Amino acid sequence: MMATLNKVGAAEAPLPDVLTMQNGVKVTSAAMWQQQRRPEVLELFRKNVYGRAPVERPANLKFEIESITPDMMEGKATRKQVRISFSGPGGAGAIHLLLFVPNHAPQPVPCFLLICNRTSDNIDLTRAVKSPFWPAEALVARGYAAAAFHVSDADPDQDDGFKNGVHGIFDKPGVPRPPDAWGTIAAWSWGASRVMDYLQTDTSLDAKRVAVVGHSRGGKAALWAGAQDERFALVISNESGSTGAAIARGKHGETIKDINQHFPHWFCQNYKSYNGREQDLPVDQHMLAALIAPRLLYIASATEDTWSDPPAEFRAGVEAGPVYKLFGLTGLSAATMPKPDSPVQDGHIGYHVRTGKHNLTAYDWDCFMNFADKHFGTHKAGSTR
Ligand code: GTR
């Protein structure tokens, strides 16, 4: 079966029907999706792929504004550093949120939150280092707040038997981990939701226009965060590949077996039983994309990123379409892959494939902001451009 799947590729492999319930009943309305199928699909991903977080917002979650610096970026932005702290049976932890809010845009401003999986100089708080991975100046210039946190605050990216990070804090001490216990990707998604808990309290920000963005492994986390947490208005996956936006069945490049072998801590134990058995998974990644509906979704690929498999990423967007349709919306506005560097942005799902390598670049961010401008309606709200 797998040999056949690989031959057709993820662009054509037969997929589980996003609109057919486990009991065979067909979903025919937005209400039925929202009330019955959506919870079912979420549960399938929890149980089989990302694992189950033992806690959502901890009762003791605390926000401390550590600093407010009003004259950053030559007076164009106010920097805030916020410590988001929590504790559980295994100890205490904190996420350090870095936020630049434009000084000359009408507040409350929309916001892009990056789940940063690269070294922390990519989200330099002094701005001495300006990385295209997080072009905070460009975001501010276009009237967006730029927010970021580093994944290691939620969970260091190490296969350490789930001792450090939020696993060590919230997992029940002395109890063996169940096969659907959360992995590291789910921990990062949890972190994004705790940041959202803070963003909702900041009156300079419009919490109804927050985009969560991630690249590669961070993109997997952004998708899972957006799938679960309906407060994110826009979810952006940049080259998230395997177990991110890319369809697993027939996928070229990284397979479920590859990812589980190289990164055994990313997903739950149950996911390993699907190594080489993609066709037996009750889900595929178009169903993850569909969990974002009716909200905005953006999927980005790069031509040379064959490990992620761009056609497999594009297809997930296409196949999420029927769910958007239930809401009377267009998902992707193209049925076939666009040419490189020709973004498709008319529908509620945006897509582009950039020329070049696996990376998050200024071009990608530009496309994300164009999509947000178009669909968040910042022009109407009075953008400063
Ligand atoms: C790779 C991994 C991908 C992707 C990437 C990254 O090694 O196989 O799934 O997550 O790392 O995060 O850059």
Image (spheres, rainbow, N blue to C red):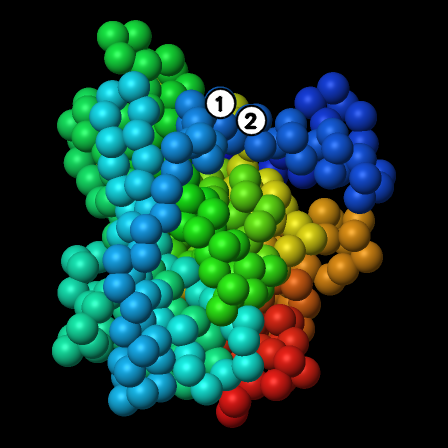
Which mark is on residue 44? 2
Residue type, mark 2 in image: Leu
Q: Position of residue 77 (x, y in %)?
A: 35, 80
Which mark is on residue 47? 1
Residue 362 visible to the viewer: no
Q: Identify the secondary structure beneath mark 2.
A: helix
Residue at the extreme bottom of the image, as rendered = 385
Looking at the image, is 330 positioned above or below residue 223? below
Residue type, mark 1 in image: Lys
Q: Nearer the viewer, residue 174 or 205?
A: 205
Crowding near pointer 2: few (<14 within 10 Å), some, many (20+)? Answer: some
Q: Quadrant of residue 43?
A: top right
Q: Position of residue 197 (x, y in %)?
A: 47, 47
Q: Are marks 1 and 2 in contact (CB under 8 Å)?
A: yes
Residue at screen point 54% across, 40% down? 228
Crowding near pointer 1: few (<14 within 10 Å), some, many (20+)? Answer: some
Q: Position of residue 145 (x, y in %)?
A: 43, 71
Looking at the image, is 347 positioned above or below residue 257? below
Residue at the extreme top of the image, as rendered = 175
Residue at screen point 80% across, 26% down? 25
Give the distance between the C-alpha atoms of the residues marked 1 and 2, in whole angstroms: 5 Å
Q: How many marks?
A: 2
Whether residue 355 sits left or right of residue 211 in the image: it is left
Q: Identify the secondary structure beneath mark 1.
A: helix
Residue 204 visible to the viewer: yes
Residue at screen point 30% across, 30% down? 87
Whether residue 65 sits left or right of residue 210 in the image: it is left
Q: Quadrant of residue 155?
A: top left
Q: Position of residue 72 (x, y in %)?
A: 27, 80
Residue at screen point 52% across, 48% down? 226
Looking at the image, is 3 positioned above or below residue 171? below
